[in-house]
Amino acid sequence: MNSGKAGSGKKSLGQTACKVISVRATLILLAAGVCLVCTLPTLAQSQPQTQPPPSPSQPPSGAHAAAPQEPSPVESLAGTISGTVVDQMGAVVSGAVVKLARGNPSLTAEATSDSDGQFFFANLAPGPFQLTITAPGFASQSVTGTLNPGEDHTIPLLALAVAASASEVRVSMTPVEMAEAEIKDEEKQRVLGVIPNFYVTYNPSAVPLHPRQKFELAWKLTIDPVNFGVTAAIAGIQQAANSFSGYGQGAQGYGKRLGAAYADSVTSTFIGGAVLPSLFKQDPRFFYKGSGSRRARFFYAIANSVICKGDNGHWQASYSALLGSLAAGGISNLYYPESDRDMTVTFENTLIGIGATAANNVLQEFVIRKLTHNPPKYATATP
């Protein structure tokens, strides 16, 4: 009995010991597991994370694939001017001041040559320009040219001469010279490559014309062969319709009509396009707008039949055109048949002329530029 109890006690003690050992082992394993769980994040953070390289068909992470954008019409016209300043021996001149002058004073820019003697102007509207280069100890130098649309214009090496004296003379392109360059472009403007279209400028910042240039432009249009042809056609139409019947028919009647039609053209062109614009200091040209809504451009063209741009850059009543039409009509009474001389007709023709000018301006704004071969390209803006 005692031995059985003893055996039973030993067995109980053995079971208890096993349970204790089992519990301890479990606790040890549990503690090890907790430690392992706690240390895994730390190990994960300490390990450098590697990412697979981006697929060629997919953009890199965090980047947005931007679709290429077409440049705006104005941006596509912008150009650059660059060059290098050297001395007479060919050594580069750093620190030279390069001033860029355009027709509009607001477009003036300035740059300084770098350690390699180079300078650079970007985002420039096309048109005539002048560079004035100055540097201490050197004589100033000026360079003129014309920047074409989208052109990267490189100026040849600018060799500065040593200044003869301490005094410095700055040479700049005068407004008259700028206007002369623009007139050369305007005299090339022909509708369908034939009909002269001299009295419109596509440069919203065009400088005003000198009185001499206003007369030169009027003379250029007056002697243009196409103008003779148009005048002859007008005389033929008048002959067929028996207009100004006092001239009669036949060759003599046609000759009188031809002379009267050409006299009308000469007087209206010179009085309304040169004489009065010089006296009133007004620009006889139509300033093409080319930007804004169609409605705004339409009313702009209509308004330009009675207003114009002054030589001071401000809009004003077009006294030159209005009084020019009246004056030309009054002069025509000197050579028209007596039966057709009437001041009432003169005023009526003046009003008709205003309407014709308005219609022509609308065509200039919306149609004629498309029919003009190689018109000068400038950044469009509100004149």
Image (cartoon, rainbow, N blue to C red):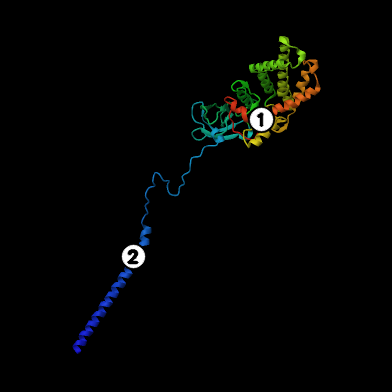
**Is residue 52 something that shows in the picture?**
yes
Whole-percent x, y for residue 33 in the image: 33, 67
**Mark 1: which amino acid?**
Val
Q: Which residue in the structure is indicated by mark 1?
A: 362
| Element type at mark 2 | helix
Q: Which x, y percent locates residue 370?
A: 59, 28
Q: Earlier in the sequence, mark 1 or mark 2?
A: 2
- For residue 123, the mark is none
Q: Helix, strand or loop at disc 1?
A: helix
Judged from this view, the residue extending furthest toward the bottom is 1
Residue extending farthest top: 251
Q: Is residue 98 left or right of residue 329?
A: left
* Quarter of image, res 200: top right
The structure residue drawn at horizontal position 68% and vertical position 28%, both measured from the top left corner, is 359
Question: How crowded is the residue under tag 1: few (<14 C-alpha within 10 Å), some, or many (20+)?
Answer: many
| Residue at the spot 76% in from the left edge and 13% down from the top edge | 247
Position of residue 135 measured from the top left corner of the image (x, y, whole percent): 56, 31
Q: Residue at x 64, y 16 (%)?
A: 225
Instruction: Look at label 2 and name its amino acid.
Output: Leu
Q: Against 251, is 307 above or below?
A: below
The image quarter containing residue 193 is top right
Q: Is residue 329 above or below residue 295?
A: above
CA distance separating discs 1 and 2? 86 Å
Q: Can you identify the residue that label 2 sits on?
A: 36
